[in-house]
Image: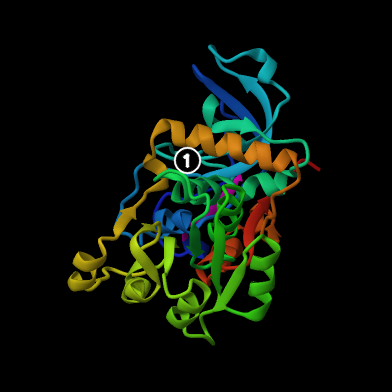
């Protein structure tokens, strides 16, 4: 098979290699997928670059956790009826050497889930990390029906799904965005109101939109940058769900914390309760079957241009998803 890999960490153009590798064979409880599309996330950049000071877990790594394709072989313990299924993949390279930046991948059967008929392979490759993160951030503390949820970075890969999941669960949704164009994207995804954080006072706008009460829940991708805003936007006893650091550390007022008793949750998508993944998959299927899911615009690259795709992600990809198109020609 044709694949991309790295054997040492560093800049994309210096360490990523493209060539031929043996076709993998599925083991016990595994499926093999002919990959049609491979989704790229910031976490893939951390592993390849070594920026988070994590070394090489394997001698050779094929990157990328997310993807989509068609099951073409199964290992023992997996029903042969799965052969031919269109699937989307999640955590494909988690604690494994080989991810989705290749023509074929083997992975545990439960990480290859049915792709609803109305979803394209490119859309399937957008899911994985962003969908699972957004879903858990919305549902981890119970129902949000009747609550006001603020989705920071509403046109990020996680944010766009966070808006839709929260709306589907009965919440009123406010999203922060970086431009009028992104505001339109967030509104089209279902946001009830948007705040342009580059032009508006976020705290004042939240107060105006909530009659001074603040929001019940915040989905936060930039904790270290935005923590000082929490006292201005959170309702008393509200919940902040942090899924991105945005820097080495952040701080909040201890006096505000004691007086307002917020819950601040830090989540790590790769280590959620087992049922969380099942519920996220089921909710996607239900919404997608009914045609109620919007995805971000996609920019596609060939496997041979994987270094360019990685560089595009590293420049900041809010509002666009970077995808490797590996569909058979």
Q: Is residue 155 above or below residue 75?
A: below
Q: Residue at x 50, y 19 (%)?
A: 27
Query: Is residue 252 visible in the rendered structure shown here?
Result: yes
Q: Was residue 18 drawn as part of the magenta stretch in this picture?
A: yes
Q: Residue beneath label 1, please?
A: 93
Indicate the secondary structure of the residue bearing disc 1: loop
64 or 250: nearer the viewer:
250
Query: Is residue 102 visible in the rendered structure shown here?
Result: no
Q: Is residue 313 above or below residue 96?
A: below
Percent x, y for residue 270? Answer: 40, 43
Colouring scheme, one of rainbow, by chain, secondary structure, one colour: rainbow
* Image label count: 1
Q: Residue at x 22, y 73 (%)?
A: 253
Percent x, y for residue 117? Answer: 77, 36
312 or 193: nearer the viewer:
193
Percent x, y for residue 185? Answer: 68, 68
Direction from residue 164 to residue 254 in the image, left or right: left
Which residues make up the magenta segment?
A: 15-19
65 or 213: nearer the viewer:
213
Residue lying farthest right? 329
Percent x, y for residue 5? Answer: 51, 48
Q: Residue at x 64, y 73 (%)?
A: 182
Q: In the picture, which quadrant includes the N terminus?
A: top right
Q: Residue at x 67, y 67 (%)?
A: 187
Q: Quadrant of residue 230?
A: bottom left
Q: Was residue 175 drawn as part of the magenta stretch in this picture?
A: no
Q: Is residue 163 above or below residue 282?
A: below
Q: Is residue 59 above or below residue 9?
A: above
Q: Residues within 10 Å of mark 1 (few under 14, many from 20)?
A: many
């Amino acid at each position: 098979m044709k694949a991309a890999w790295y054997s040492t960490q560093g800049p994309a153009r210096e360490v990523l290699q493209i060539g031929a590798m043996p076709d993998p064979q599925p083991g016990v409880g595994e499926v093999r997928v002919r990959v049609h599309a491979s989704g790229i996330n910031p976490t893939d950049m951390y592993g390849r670059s070594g920026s988070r000071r994590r070394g090489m877990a394997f001698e050779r790594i094929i990157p990328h956790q997310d993807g989509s394709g068609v099951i073409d072989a199964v290992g023992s313990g997996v029903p042969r009826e799965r052969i031919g299924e269109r699937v989307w993949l999640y955590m494909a390279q988690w604690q494994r050497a080989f991810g989705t930046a290749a023509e074929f991948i083997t992975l545990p059967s439960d990480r290859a889930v049915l792709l609803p008929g109305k979803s394209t392979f490119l859309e399937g490759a957008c899911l994985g990390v962003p969908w699972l993160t957004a879903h858990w951030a919305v549902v981890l503390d119970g129902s949000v029906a009747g609550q006001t949820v603020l989705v920071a970075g509403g046109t990020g890969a996680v944010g766009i799904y966070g808006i839709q999941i929260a709306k589907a669960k009965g919440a009123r949704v406010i999203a922060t965005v970086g431009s009028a164009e992104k505001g339109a994207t967030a509104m089209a995804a279902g946001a009830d109101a948007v705040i342009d954080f580059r032009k508006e006072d976020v705290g004042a706008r939240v107060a105006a939109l909530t009659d001074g009460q603040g929001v019940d829940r915040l989905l936060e991708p930039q904790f270290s940058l935005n923590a000082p805003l929490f006292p201005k936007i959170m309702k008393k006893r509200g919940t902040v769900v942090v899924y991105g650091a945005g820097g080495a550390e952040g701080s909040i007022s201890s006096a505000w914390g004691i007086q307002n008793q917020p819950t601040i949750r830090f989540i790590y998508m790769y280590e959620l309760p087992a049922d969380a993944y099942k519920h996220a998959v089921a909710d996607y299927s239900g919404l997608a079957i009914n045609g109620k899911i919007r995805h971000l615009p996609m920019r596609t690259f060939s496997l041979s241009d994987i270094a360019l795709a990685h560089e595009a992600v590293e420049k900041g990809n809010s509002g666009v998803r970077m995808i490797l198109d590996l569909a058979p020609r």
